[in-house]
Image (cartoon, helix red, strand yellow):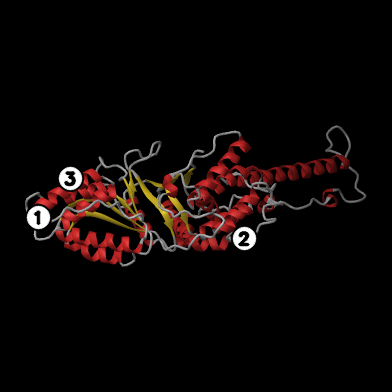
Amino acid sequence: MVFSLFGRKDKVDPKKDSPPAGRGEPRGAGSGPTLAAQREAARSTREKIDRIESEMIAAEAVARAGLSSLPTKPAGTAAAGGKAKAPPDDGTSLVLGDAAGAMAIDVNGPALPPMLEEAAILYSNGQTQPAALVLRQALDDPEVAGFRPLAWLMLLDLHQCVGDRAGFEALALRYAAQFESSPPGWSDALSAAHAATSPAAPATPASSLRSLSLSGPIDASFAERARDFGSHAGAEATLDCSRAESLDADGAQALLALLAGFERARATLTVFGADRLFALARASIEPGRRDPSQACWMLALQALRLLGRQQDFDDLGIEYCVTYEVSPPSWEPAAESFRTMRAPDAQAAPAPVGVAPALAGSPIASSGAFVLQGEVLGRMQDELQALRNFASGRGDVVVDCRSLRRMEFVAAGDLLNEVATMRSAGRQVLFVEPNYLVYALMLVMGIHDLAEIRRRKV
């Protein structure tokens, strides 16, 4: 009890306050209160103290409940019926490590019903079939209650992330009828780099999404990096050429070998800034000038294939034919496993690795945002190092999650640890519009207690 800290006696013994037996109370106008009046005053005082103490305890409980950013279920039902157990408090402390202790931040438990926690964890570990089953059950489960719209949005995003457009559209019609409002639209950003897979079947385990960013000159010094990156061409990856500044024949040859490796492996490679790559290759060649190596010509033609610019390809092919007196190359579309995306801001100054321009409504309108995209699996050392580089010198850190399809549980733990470290350094972190499966995982991990999460508008 609160007042016990200040030495309050638990009970007042009325016998100690009463006068000794046989001694009468002085009477008269100047005499003190009677024995009965003293006892009544003591009883009233005890009741008043107990009432104040109860009110203070109740106020403290309300204040603690108010620390949660989202409403939680009543205490009696929060743990009932859950198939997947949330990480215990000591596990969260281990994830946070020393940074959390230094910050003395109280990370609250998950703010979701157990079924949605389970679905988020299942999906994060690549178990799309069990996750879809749990979410379908959650749509009509009374324990989900006020979180039912989130269950619908999670299931819609699951269809979208695995590329099941037909299933998504059928569920979107049911969503519109259920909530009498427009359903979410299909997002190419979430599904463009994912092979179409039905949510009724388990997803094929994938390796970590890898990325390679080209900055400065692309020359002979780039060859070793290209060979290392291309040696794992069987895994999904991204190649960002938007920050490259120059190109020579050695660099062009290394890039051609890298692209050929991904084409042979039929692995998904998303290329950012292919137009920049073409511009650099085109600037390195001259019609009528026979260079010792034709690598820059071949790379320029390959970049036009990636961009789908057949007429420009044919025109450049004629120039190549005249220069080297050979037959012109024939047009062939880029490999189906290649996907081209425009650099976030082609007109802006080059941005750091993994960084996109500022988002509308962002608190740092001129600094840009760090991009997490695709699938972040396993220990995310490379992504976190790039995030640290981006955050250096910034007070506010914006992380663009609009193209992030999935994050494994262990990766989310690493991200939580990094966010805790940033908070301890005085930085504010904002995650922008993760899909609702990733959003639910962030709630399970407690990231919402350390950072702001801006949810996607339906």
Q: Position of residue 341 (x, y in %)?
A: 33, 47
For this view, does 424 lie left or right of residue 53?
Answer: left
Q: Which mark is residue 325?
A: 1
For this view, does 90 lie left or right of residue 74?
Answer: left
Label 1 environment density (alpha carbons within 10 Å; few <14, some 14–19, many ≥20): few
Q: Nearer the viewer, mark 3 or mark 1?
A: 1
Q: Residue furthest left?
A: 289
Q: Position of residue 237 (x, y in %)?
A: 35, 58
Q: CA distance from mark 1 to mark 2?
A: 70 Å
Q: Amino acid at mark 1?
A: Glu
Callout 3: helix, strand or loop? helix
Label 2 environment density (alpha carbons within 10 Å; few <14, some 14–19, many ≥20): few
Q: Residue furthest right?
A: 22
Q: Amino acid at mark 2?
A: Lys
Q: Residue furthest top?
A: 29
Between 53 and 276, the one lying in front of the other is 276
Residue denoted by label 2: 85
Residue denoted by label 3: 315
Residue in the image at 61% along x and 47% along y: 64
